[in-house]
């Protein structure tokens, strides 16, 4: 038994302006029109700077979680090396893709140096320098980073934190980094 197929079923569907025929012969509505926003998209450099900021910020957020405590200088050295390597990758990727955010280049390497150093006086100097690059680096942020250094006494931590009480000036222009990072 053969099914009878009329030729009218195989005939192409009539064309309606603005509609396209599907494989089944049915008409499909035209794709929706995408209206351009009145504002033009940000330039690629601005977009890459935002990506660069996001990557650095998220890296610092993860470092500041207070879940990592390293008691030996060897562990701290290893972490500092890892942070430096990650910083190099982030910087290279973002710079090669057009990020003009040179102000972010010190953020991770200097934190790695704070973690690497063992002498509280040397850490103080590094923190003071860091605060000139990133004036919104607070005692809360510093405490979160110093918490990684499980071999510092509470008096050493207090002494290092006190360096942020001294105004050291800032590098211009100042852009927010740590004010975007909540700690505590």
Image (tube, rainbow, N blue to C red):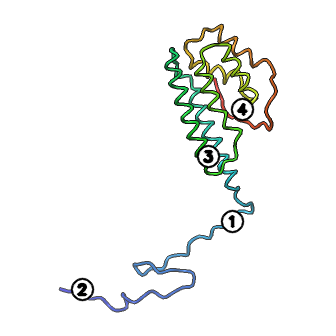
Which residue lies under the disc numbered 1?
A: 36
Up-down: is 164 above or below 81?
above
Using the image as rendered, state which of residue 155 and residue 168 is in the foreground: 168
Mark 2 or mark 4, whichever is nearer to me: 4
Name the image quarter holding residue 38. bottom right
Which residue lies under the disc numbered 3?
A: 94
Which residue lies under the disc numbered 2?
A: 3
User: Are the residues tagged 2 and 1 within 8 Å (C-beta)?
Assistant: no
What is the C-alpha distance between the residues marked 2 and 1? 51 Å
Quarter in which the C terminus is drawn: top right
User: Are the residues tagged 1 and 4 within 8 Å (C-beta)?
Assistant: no
Q: Dot 2: what SS? A: loop
Residue 95's spot in the image, x, y percent? 63, 47
Which residue lies under the disc numbered 4?
A: 179
What is the C-alpha distance between the residues marked 1 and 4? 34 Å
Circle 2 crowding by C-alpha within 10 Å: few under 14, some 14–19, many from 20: few
Up-down: is 151 above or below 148?
above
Q: Dot 4: what SS? A: helix
Mark 4 or mark 3, whichever is nearer to me: 3
Q: Dot 1: what SS? A: loop
Which callout, 1 or 4, points at the residue further toward the start of the chain?
A: 1
């Amino acid at each position: 038994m053969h099914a009878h197929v009329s030729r009218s079923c195989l005939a192409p569907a009539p064309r309606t302006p603005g509609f396209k025929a599907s494989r089944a012969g049915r008409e499909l509505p035209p794709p929706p029109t995408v209206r351009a926003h009145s504002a033009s998209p940000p330039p690629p450099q601005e977009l890459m700077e935002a990506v660069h900021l996001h990557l650095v910020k998220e890296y610092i957020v993860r470092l500041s979680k207070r879940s990592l405590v390293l008691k030996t200088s060897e562990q701290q050295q290893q972490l500092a090396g890892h942070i430096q390597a990650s910083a190099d990758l982030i910087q290279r990727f973002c710079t090669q893709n057009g990020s003009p955010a040179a102000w972010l280049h010190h953020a991770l390497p200097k934190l790695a140096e704070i973690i690497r150093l063992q002498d509280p006086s040397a850490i103080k100097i590094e923190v003071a320098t860091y605060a000139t690059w990133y004036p919104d680096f607070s005692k809360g942020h510093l405490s979160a980073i110093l918490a990684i250094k499980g071999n510092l006494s509470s008096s050493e931590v207090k002494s290092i934190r006190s360096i942020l009480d001294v105004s050291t000036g800032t590098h211009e222009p100042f852009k927010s980094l740590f004010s975007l990072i909540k700690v505590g």
